[in-house]
């Protein structure tokens, strides 16, 4: 397991997530209300009521809230006020917990070694998959028969005879499975949101996506391409590193990612930039020339140039714009999420993402809860009704 903590100015443990980051209220109903004018009685009451003074002074209230937020996680002084004998018991519990955490660290390290062991056993199967995808070999009849049986089990309403008849008369010259990895990537929603139309042309040249564990905690994603007109590389890599020491929860903590340089064949083929051309005329010579303006643009291939947290001195730390910090943290979070989903979801079940079965099944646990459940509202009225309760959604393990 890995803690998905993304660095903020190099501090990985304080990354915002949808769970701990409050949403903005700038578009809320309260913002649309017209200001009211208080009466004299209200003003007098306000002077005698500190809470009313705070409510009528948003700037002061925000300042106090900001100050209070810095106290979160600070010692409350409760332990210091305990009696000496109780303090000793608390210290004893800390020692017991420390022993448990040492065992947890051993467990995580052994678990990583076990993952590496079985990953080695997966390799021949991944290589076999690659050979079939690119057309180096054909599946055996026993593999086809087993796959058809799986299909009948998963989709009993689909008639398999039509496919068998079509296969017997098929004289197609198609090699392998065209656009296998592009289709699989586009069915994985988080990744699909980063793929542009220009990216699709490039990703159609994907030959294989695989991963390797590092000798240190971490992994490398490997994207293998056939020879193409877009870049000279045949291999693009993205490497994710974890801290050598386990985090507080006993899991490995994400540290940083390294990409690779893409050797684009030309500026026009570089899908990570947009080109704006305009003509400029010299007032003296009357000659014209073409000016090119290159602008970075959204692209899946920015994945290979991961964002880096700035390294600031203590004096400069407070000068960084908060909006820029939030944007950087968001890009770091997305970068980490993409790597984890390709490693844990796409690569092991690539054929299910290609066929769309993984999308339909919500692999691994994408089922949606009821809106009322998500909002935390228990529908007490329904508890009095005689309506039969629906079965809970199926729990799928990752």
Image (cartoon, grey):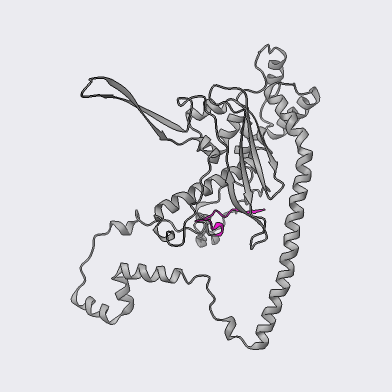
Left or right placement of residue 293 versus residue 250 in this view: left
Evaluate whether residue 362 shows in this view: no
Of all residues shown, which one is farthest toward the front? 285
Quarter of the rendering containing residue 239:
top right
Compared with 221, 251 (above or below) is below
Q: Which of 255 and 17 is in front in this view?
A: 255
- Which residue sits at x=34%, y=76%? 51
**Residue at coordinates 35% horizontally, 55% vertically from top-left?**
26
> Residue at left 18%, top 76%?
40
**166 w.r.t. 354: above or below:** above
- Picture coordinates of residue 244, whole percent (x, y): 67, 55
Question: 156 or 4: nearer the eye?
Answer: 4
Instruction: Find out whether residue 4 is within the magenta segment.
Output: yes
Question: How many numbered dots are placed on residues in this image?
Answer: 0
At horizontal 53% and vertical 36% (from top left) the residue drawn is 192
Looking at the picture, how far across and down is residue 327, in whole percent?
Answer: 44, 49
Q: Is residue 231 visible?
A: yes
| Main secondary structure along the magenta-highlighted residues | loop
Decide whether residue 62 is among the magenta residues. no
Residue at the far right: name it.
142
Taking the image as shown, residue 108 lies to the left or right of residue 301, namely right
Question: Horizontal and vertical percent for residue 55?
Answer: 32, 71
Q: Is residue 12 above or below residue 91?
A: above
Residue 391 rendering spot, x and y as whole percentages:
63, 51
Q: Within the image, what quadrant is residue 143 found in?
A: top right
Vertical position of residue 315 compared to residue 267: above or below: below
Which region shows up in magenta? Answer: 1-13
């Amino acid at each position: 397991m890995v803690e998905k903590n993304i660095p903020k100015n190099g501090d990985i443990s304080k990354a915002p997530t949808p769970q701990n980051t409050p949403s903005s209220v700038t578009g809320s109903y309260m913002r649309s209300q017209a200001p009211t004018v208080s009466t004299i009685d209200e003003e007098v009451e306000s002077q005698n009521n500190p809470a009313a003074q705070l409510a009528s002074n948003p700037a002061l209230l925000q300042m106090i809230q900001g100050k209070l937020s810095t106290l979160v996680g600070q010692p409350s002084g409760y332990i210091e006020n305990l009696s000496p004998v109780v303090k000793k018991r608390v210290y004893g519990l800390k020692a017991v917990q420390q022993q448990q955490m040492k065992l947890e660290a051993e467990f995580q390290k052994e678990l990583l070694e076990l993952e590496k062991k079985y990953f080695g056993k997966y390799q021949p199967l991944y290589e076999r998959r690659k050979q079939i995808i690119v057309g180096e070999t054909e599946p055996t009849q026993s593999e086809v028969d087993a796959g058809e049986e799986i299909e009948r089990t998963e989709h009993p309403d689909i008639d398999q005879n039509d496919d068998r008849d079509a296969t017997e008369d098929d004289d197609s010259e198609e090699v392998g499975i065209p656009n296998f990895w592009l289709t699989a990537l586009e069915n994985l929603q988080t990744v699909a949101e980063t793929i542009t139309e220009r990216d699709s042309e490039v990703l159609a040249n994907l030959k294989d996506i695989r991963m390797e564990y590092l000798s240190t905690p971490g992994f490398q994603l490997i994207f293998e391409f056939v020879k193409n007109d877009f870049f000279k590389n045949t291999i693009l890599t993205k490497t994710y590193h974890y801290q050598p020491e386990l985090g507080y929860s006993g899991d490995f903590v994400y540290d940083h990612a390294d990409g690779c340089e893409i050797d684009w064949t030309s500026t026009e083929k570089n899908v990570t930039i947009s080109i704006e051309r305009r003509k400029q005329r010299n007032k003296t010579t009357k000659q014209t020339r073409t000016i090119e303006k290159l602008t970075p643009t959204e692209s899946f291939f920015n994945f290979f140039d991961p964002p880096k947290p700035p390294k600031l001195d203590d004096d400069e730390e407070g000068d960084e714009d908060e909006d820029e910090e939030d944007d950087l943290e968001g890009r770091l979070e997305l970068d980490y999420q993409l790597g984890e989903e390709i490693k844990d979801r796409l690569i092991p079940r690539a054929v299910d993402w290609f066929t769309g079965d993984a999308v339909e099944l919500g692999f691994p646990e994408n089922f949606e809860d009821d809106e009322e459940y998500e909002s935390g509202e228990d529908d007490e009225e329904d508890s009095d009704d005689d309506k039969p309760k629906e079965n809970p959604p199926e729990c799928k393990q990752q």
